[in-house]
Image (tube, rainbow, N blue to C red):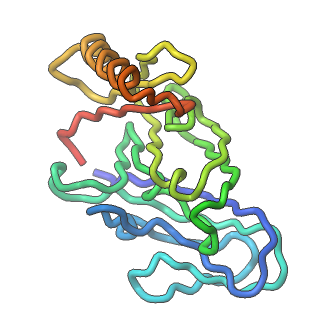
Amino acid sequence: MPVSAIKVETEIIGDMSGEVILDLPYAWANATYYKQIKNVKLEYPIGKLQFRNQDSNEAILNTGKINIIRLSYEIYQKTGNPCDVHEAIIRQNLIHSPGYGLFATPGDLNGNDIVEFNVEWNNIPEAWQAISDYGLGKSVKFKATRIELYSAVYAAGDLRVYKIVDQKNPVYLSLHGQFDLKDEEIASYINKIIKGQRAFFHDNDFPYYVISLIEGDEP
């Protein structure tokens, strides 16, 4: 069976010079994303990335004045007991991960810096759907802090997507695989829970919100 993998191409725009540090996916909670990363390549400018040590996610580039960096890397599915796999999910019919497992960012970003991001899903099957906490579709643009980028969920694949809270700040339910309950039952139960929580907490300050359920019989 071939090993599932995706290629991530990152373009960072801004004024840069001297020692530039790029933070690649590393770890969060109990997940060790850096073990899934292979074949890191600096596409532009011409040069070589150095890593602080073997298990470091800090890629270092020394350069003159530039205004763009392009790099690429591959993310491979982690093997093991599905119950113990908490990293990025890379299947033949599904890609699913928080931003912690996908994205490289400049190391000098402050926690409160608001950055414009553009996430595009390219070269995936036409029938696939793509969804994230920032909207539906294979291309989404949004402004966020680095932590907000990392903590959101991003998924593409054989998904069944339902809009379950009919408000100006919608909640989307993404289902992959088969479950004991019918899709309509799952959507109805979650719809009631979310509406009750929002009515009690007045929690309506998110433009989008995604709930993702995945059948867990494989990594």
Residue at 41% of width from left, 16% of height from top? Answer: 164
Relative horizontal placement of residue 158, taking residue 118 as reference (left or right): left
Residue 189 picture quarter: top left
Relative horizontal placement of residue 84, taking residue 18 as reference (left or right): left
Q: Residue 92 location in percent, x, y?
A: 37, 42
Q: Is residue 194 above or below residue 27?
A: above
Q: Nearer the viewer, residue 60 or 135?
A: 135
Disc tally is 0
Q: Nearer the viewer, residue 197 or 123?
A: 197
Q: Nearer the viewer, residue 43 or 52?
A: 52
Residue at 43% of width from left, 22% of height from top? Answer: 161
Residue at 62% of width from left, 43% of height from top? Answer: 120
Q: Residue 194 location in percent, x, y?
A: 35, 23
Q: Residue 108 location in percent, x, y?
A: 63, 74
Q: Residue 9 location in percent, x, y?
A: 61, 58
Residue at 55% of width from left, 57% of height from top? Answer: 8
Q: Is residue 196 above or below residue 44?
A: above
Residue 84 picture quarter: bottom left
Q: Is residue 196 above or below residue 73?
A: above
Q: Nearer the viewer, residue 105 or 88?
A: 105
